[in-house]
Image (cartoon, helix red, strand yellow):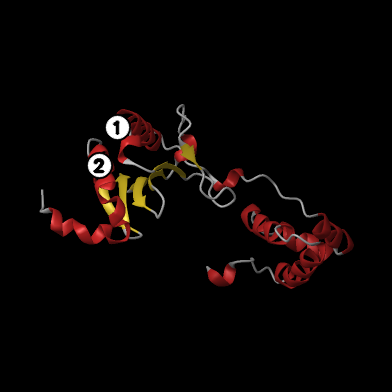
Amino acid sequence: MEPESDKKHIWDKVNNWEEELLFLKSIIDKTELSETIKWGGPVYVYNTKNVVGIGGFKDYFTIWFFNGVFLKDEKKKLINAQEDKTKSLRQWRFTSKEEVNEKEVLEYILEAIENEKQGKIIKPTKKETIVSELLEKEMNQNPALSEAFQKFSPYKQYEFLEYIETAKQEKTKLSRIEKVIPMILGNIGLNDKYR
């Protein structure tokens, strides 16, 4: 074991939870996961796949499961920190070391590793289809547009539809449609310029 002082720098941000995080770390060390540092904090990987991470925040410290959505969560401990953004990440938050039940935490981690071994991941292809009535209307009036749209891969079609339909107001949807029509006709994907 390297002397504690070498480890200090990792925990600068979270030094009010140092002891608690070292305790979580000691639990994770009992598994086959290996520790890496990503995003300024420890992340534990199995075969290069992120399985769990730990970190401290102002009011709590947490262990998060990258594919936590697949955990049975019988103890009802996991929360989805950003309901709309996060499909698979789940957090288990603690506010004191006493709250950390080593046996339970280990069970969750072992289950997460097992899921990783079975290759359970959320596949982006399973997206629920989005219907854009406004775009449909445009395409009905403009067969060339409809034909051009059909040439895109389902994924790129989805990106257009998502872009249009995530607008809250009809007028925004319409202005987004205006914007994408020339792209569709020019066979340019919504995010092509960023790829």
Q: Which quarter of the figure has residue 177?
A: bottom right
Tell me if residue 108 comes above or below residue 177 in the rendering.
Answer: above
> What kind of residue is marked 1?
Glu
Tell me if residue 76 comes above or below residue 186 in the rendering.
Answer: above
Residue closest to the eye, 138 or 176: 176
Residue 124 in percent (x, y) is at: 56, 47
Find numbered disc 2 in the image and state the secondary structure of the residue it sits on: helix
Q: In the shown orientation, is residue 194 left or right of residue 43?
A: right
Residue 61 in percent (x, y) is at: 37, 48
Q: Residues within 10 Å of mark 1 (few under 14, many from 20)?
A: some
What is the spatial separation of the Cα atoms under label 1 and label 2, in whole angstroms? 9 Å
Residue shown at 44%/42% (left/top)?
67
Residue 100 in percent (x, y) is at: 33, 36
Tell me if residue 171 comes above or below residue 37 in the rendering.
Answer: below
Q: Residues within 10 Å of mark 2 (few under 14, many from 20)?
A: some
Residue 137 in percent (x, y) is at: 86, 58
Residue labelled with disc 2: 23
Q: Which quarter of the figure has residue 163?
A: bottom right
Residue labelled with disc 1: 102
Q: In the shown orientation, is residue 89 left or right of residue 42?
A: right
* Residue 6's disc number: none
Residue shown at 22%/35% (left/top)?
30
Q: Which quarter of the figure has residue 26?
A: top left
Residue closest to the eye, 25 or 17: 17
Residue closest to the eye, 148 or 174: 174
Residue shown at 68%/57% (left/top)?
162
Furthest residue to the right? 141
Find numbered disc 1 in the image and state the secondary structure of the residue it sits on: helix
Residue closest to the eye, 150 or 23: 23
Residue shown at 49%/38% (left/top)?
69
> What kind of residue is marked 2?
Phe
Q: Earlier in the sequence, mark 1 or mark 2?
A: 2
